[in-house]
Image (tube, rainbow, N blue to C red):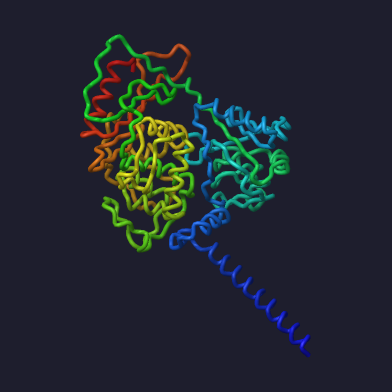
Amino acid sequence: MQEEKQKFQISKTLFGTLIFIIVALSALVSLLILDKTNLAKTSDRKFKQFYDRIVDSGIGFINIDKFFLPINDKKFEDEVEGYIKRKESFIEIDLTAMEVTLYKEGKLFKKLPVLSKGKEGSWWETPTGNYKILTKESNHFSSIGSVWMPWSMQFYGNFFIHGWPYYEDGTEVSSTYSGGCVRLSTLDAKEVYDFAKEDMALLLRDKEDSSEFAKIEQNDLGLPVPQISANSFIISNLASGEVLLEKNASSVLPISSVSNIMAGVVASELVYLGRPITVSENMLSNSLSAFEPTLGERYIAFDLLYPLMMQSSGEAASLLARFIGENHFISNMNKKATSLSMKDTVFTDVSGELPSNISSAKDLEKLLRYTYFKRKFILDISKGHQDYRFEGRKLDNLENLNPILYEANLVGLKSGKTDTGGEAIAGVWEFEKNQVEENGAQNKALVSIVILGSKDGSLDTEALLAWIEKNFDL
């Protein structure tokens, strides 16, 4: 009798455990099918990261502490050489040569062609850097493109390596279709899939050809540098990285709303920009902002980039960060800064309202270079360029609070101001040169200017622009 009672008790316990597991799984599934924006109500970072890996395309930021600038090819070569010396198996993808190379225990194993990548200049442009294979699926369904992607390997956010996509009815997508992933033939993708292991290193490069831009050469006028109020500034040939003029460029100073450039970059890489977010009361930051979000309204993430970049909106910054959690977002702003070798940069809030958001002119020049070559649409937005990618836009015709200097040549800029740190401006200009290059390069020179600690940012920037035009063959 006692033995039967014990068996009954064990069976009861197992049954209770089974019921608990079923209920827990049901609750988890329910959570996963909810709008992702509801996760803003939880502070559990691990759960958010877990959710980011599972829902839809696994939107999430991967720790890529060694990010390769578009023109820094040596760093990439050094990284590849390190894997070879350590006899590691890894994958290299060269988006300039459009080629995948598989290395097995440090030795070249096979080369395969890349058929397509993300369109340059778009927010689907394929990112470069040092990644790992995160997940593998023999056939992944993209809810963003509503297509099946055979032999998919996720390496970063919405970005995968995969075979030729097709729709539900089996029709293959056109050759011009691209969501920014690395596309191979389906047979080649299967071969990479079989070779790849989760957590295997994946190195991507896409070398920008700076020769398409004109050289910036000084003329014989030799006009003196204007006396400006800024404590620090740097003027660079953004295409080559050459410094044209600088003053205290390594000084670390508050950068205020110039932080929004990094916030825009990170948002574009962490969040699917077509995703809506519903404004709840706990999302409102109560910051001083020209943009006042409406409680209960749904805003598309892409829309929120406009008040962020045009009006330095703390509310827009807060809403964008709430897609994944504000602390997590700020953490990844700092990770991205590290990945771009911005050694003097620290972000403590998403909008730049705190004076503890600091950087140097030299660091911000690196951020401008990355943004121009990989996320140029963010600079376009800062100038007020209207982009109608998504339906249901609610934030058209916003007043632009950035000083639009030299509008004919301006690519984009961001300004900011703090009571203690003065004014800051970081911007990019494209100048049409007066003479054609002998090597057939485009008659276009690319200039960036960063000023920090200024009493009058617009006046200082105008003086430096005028000096550039007079002293260089532009």
Residue for point 49% across, 57% down: 45
Question: Residue 226's image quarter?
Answer: top left
Name the quarter where the C terminus is drawn: top left
Q: Furthest-front residue in view?
A: 2
Looking at the picture, tell me which residue is in the foreground, 170 or 112. 112
Question: Residue 280's image quarter?
Answer: bottom left
Question: Compared to 169, does 214 lie above or below?
Answer: above
From this viewpoint, is residue 462 visible?
A: yes
Looking at the picture, tell me which residue is in the foreground, 215 or 117. 215
- In percent of width and height, residue 149 lies at 64, 47
Residue for point 42% across, 51% down: 301
Q: Furthest-bottom residue in view?
A: 1
Question: Compared to 6, does 110 lie above or below?
Answer: above
Would residue 212 appear left or right of 395 to someone viewing this image? Answer: right
- In percent of width and height, residue 203 lies at 60, 35
Question: Residue 312's image quarter?
Answer: top left
Looking at the picture, tell me which residue is in the foreground, 113 or 243. 243
Would residue 174 appear left or right of 268 to someone viewing this image? Answer: right
Would residue 293 appear left or right of 168 to someone viewing this image? Answer: left
Q: How many marks?
A: 0
Name the quarter where the N terminus is drawn: bottom right
Residue for point 34% across, 14% down: 218
From this viewpoint, is residue 397 visible?
A: no
- In percent of width and height, residue 462 lies at 24, 27
Would residue 459 appear left or right of 145 to someone viewing this image? Answer: left
- In percent of width and height, residue 143 lies at 56, 53
